[in-house]
Image (tube, rainbow, N blue to C red):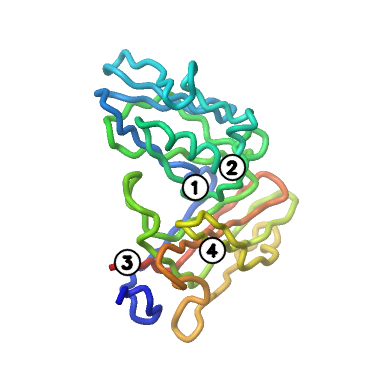
């Protein structure tokens, strides 16, 4: 029997994750092609440029986007994280996964832009995290689940949630704490909890432990949890999530 079929007996590994401004990761990308070198760059508008080739002389990789090798997030075809990750994984040269975001989250510069990243060189099969720009993104987010690299499987883990601690430092505005259950096989993302966040500059903690177990999670293998602090203005503050993850047998 798979250990995750019994939520009480499954082998737990603690997860204690903290993020602050510009600290949550939108995408993790790795080059898996045959060239000796690759580069990634993110413009101030959130557009992603992919290059590969000889080190120091890389050229745009048109297997991602024909002709340009650039994902223009202002285009309708690439306006969400789900659309962006799917087009990257459609290339034989690159692999990517979404980390601290929903598939439906916007990638355009006004509401969901990735953080500016100058062209960065990496060796093949080295994961490169692309962070979210909290001056534009209206949330901070943390995913709980096991995924060690871009070539791993999101469907081998499960997650459990114990506490969420949030702090915002808005001059004005409001925030909402939301918890999503993520089915990594079907790509379904279900909102399972929502409440108003704390007032400005007030730290707030919420406990989700019931009878020694997390109230959310560990329903079945292949489910992760995503905790978000959504805001009415650009998100400033921090978010901490304490829980556990389990790896299927």
- Residue identified by numbered label 4: 181
- Counting from the top left corner in percent of width and height, residue 221 is at 40, 67
Q: Closer to the observer: label 4 or label 1?
A: 4
Q: Looking at the image, which residue sits at the far right?
A: 172
Residue 77: quadrant of the picture: top right
Label 2, label 3: how far apart the Cα atoms are: 34 Å
Pointer 1 local density, CA inside 10 Å: few below 14, some 14–19, many at least 20: many
Q: Which mark is residue 134?
A: 2
Label 1, label 3: how far apart the Cα atoms are: 26 Å
- Residue identified by numbered label 1: 24
Q: Tags 1 and 2 in contact by the CB under 8 Å rule?
A: yes
- Residue identified by numbered label 3: 248
First in sequence, mark 1 or 2: give its number.
1
Label 1, label 2: how far apart the Cα atoms are: 9 Å
Q: Looking at the image, which residue sits at the far top?
A: 57
Question: Which quarter of the image is occupied by the C terminus?
Answer: bottom left
């Amino acid at each position: 029997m798979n250990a995750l079929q019994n939520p009480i007996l499954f082998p737990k590994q603690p997860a204690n994750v903290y993020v602050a401004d510009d600290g949550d990761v939108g995408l993790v990308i790795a080059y898996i092609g045959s060239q000796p070198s690759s580069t990634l760059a993110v413009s101030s508008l959130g557009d992603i440029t992919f290059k590969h080739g000889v080190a120091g002389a890389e050229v745009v990789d048109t297997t991602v986007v024909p002709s340009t090798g650039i994902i223009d997030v202002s285009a309708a075809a690439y306006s969400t994280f789900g659309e962006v990750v799917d087009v990257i994984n459609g290339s034989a040269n690159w692999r990517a996964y979404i980390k601290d975001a929903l598939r439906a989250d916007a990638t355009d510069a006004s509401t969901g832009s990735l953080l500016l990243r100058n062209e960065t060189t990496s060796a093949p099969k080295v994961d490169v995290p692309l962070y979210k720009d909290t001056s534009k993104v209206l949330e901070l987010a943390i995913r709980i689940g096991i995924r060690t690299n871009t070539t791993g499987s999101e469907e081998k883990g499960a997650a459990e949630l114990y506490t969420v601690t949030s702090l915002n430092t808005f001059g004005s505005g409001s925030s909402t704490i939301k918890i999503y259950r993520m089915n990594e096989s079907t790509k379904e993302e279900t909102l399972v909890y929502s409440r108003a966040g704390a007032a400005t500059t007030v730290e707030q903690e919420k406990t989700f432990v019931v009878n020694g177990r997390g109230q959310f999670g560990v329903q079945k293998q292949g489910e992760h949890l995503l905790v978000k602090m959504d805001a009415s203005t650009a998100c400033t503050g921090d978010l901490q999530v304490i829980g556990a993850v389990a790896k299927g047998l």
